[in-house]
Amino acid sequence: MKQLQYLFMTLAVMLLATPAFAQSANHDIANQWLPIGAGLGMALAAGLCGLGQGKATASATEALARNPGARPGIFIFLILGLAFIESLALFTFVIIFLKVVPIQ
């Protein structure tokens, strides 16, 4: 029953959002769907980066539990890995921002 409720809520939100496209002066179909595609792309990138960060943190915590003496080395590589993972989300944000708002 809960899944059916979520389905109807999702459909209602999607159907209520369609009038937002009614006032578009540009009839180019690619530009019409660009903001939605950008939002979905950023959501996908941020979600997957979040999963990667969770996996990295879990692995570092497990490694510290097994060998507490290796804390400095694990900590350095954990911070480095988290920075690289977060940079992927930031690069995605920059690319999407440049695509949605073209430089004139």
Image (cartoon, rainbow, N blue to C red):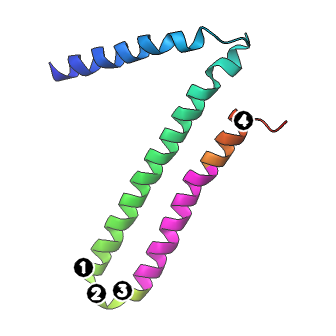
Is residue 94 depicted above or below 64 in this figure? above
User: Which label number is shown at residue 68?
Assistant: 2
The amino acid at mark 4 is Val
Q: How far apart are labels 2 and 4 at the CA level?
A: 49 Å
Quick check: marks 2 and 4 in contact, CB under 8 Å? Answer: no
Q: How far apart are labels 3 and 4 at the CA level?
A: 44 Å
Residue 64 pos. (x, y %): 30, 80
Question: Mark 4 or mark 3, which is nearer the start of the sequence?
Answer: 3
| Residue of label 4 | 101
- SS class of the residue under badge 4? loop
Question: Mark 4 or mark 2, which is nearer the start of the sequence?
Answer: 2
Q: Residue furthest right?
A: 104
User: Which label number is shown at residue 15?
Assistant: none
Question: Mark 1 or mark 3, which is nearer the start of the sequence?
Answer: 1
For residue 89, side relative to residue 10 (left or right): right
The amino acid at mark 3 is Arg
| Residue of label 3 | 71
Range drawn in magenta: 73-91
In front here: 74 or 13?
13
As for residue 82 lying within the magenta part, the answer is: yes
In front here: 61 or 38?
38
- SS class of the residue under badge 3? helix
